Amino acid sequence: MNFGKKLTGILAERGISKAHMARKLGVSPQMFQHIAKSKDVKLILAVKIAKELNLTVYDFLGDEYDGR
């Protein structure tokens, strides 16, 4: 599963809007929309998003790197 799909799923499960996450990350809603559609993101951005959601980067990327 790619980063954007996993992120969108987590936000939906937690009832968090993309606009809210954009504000928390200090990016425009349009930029966050782009992130949410991306297959991958820069590591520093993945770390910031994971921190805001009280997750680890591995929670987003683990499936991609451990053969699952």
Image: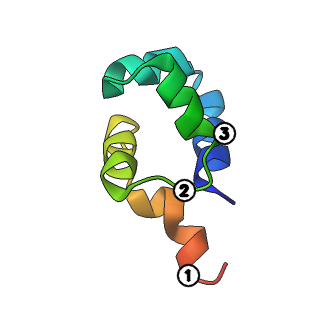
Q: Nearer the viewer, residue 51 or 39?
A: 39
The quadrant of the picture occupied by the N terminus is bottom right
Residue 53 horizontal/vertical position (percent) = 41, 37
Q: Earlier in the sequence, mark 2 or mark 1?
A: 2
Which residue appears at 31% of the width and 23% of the height? 26
Secondary structure of the residue carrying numbered label 3: helix
* Amino acid under disc 2: Asp
Secondary structure of the residue carrying numbered label 1: loop
The quadrant of the picture occupied by the C terminus is bottom right
* Residue 39 visible in image: yes
Residue highlighted by disc 2 = 40
Q: Nearer the viewer, mark 2 or mark 1?
A: 2
Mark 2–mark 1 Cα distance, whole angstroms, equals 16 Å
Which residue appears at 40% of the width and 50% of the height? 46
Residue 61 horizontal/vertical position (percent) = 51, 64
Residue highlighted by disc 1 = 66
Q: Nearer the viewer, mark 3 or mark 2?
A: 2
Q: Earlier in the sequence, mark 3 or mark 2?
A: 3
Q: How many marks?
A: 3
Which residue appears at 36% of the width and 46% of the height? 45
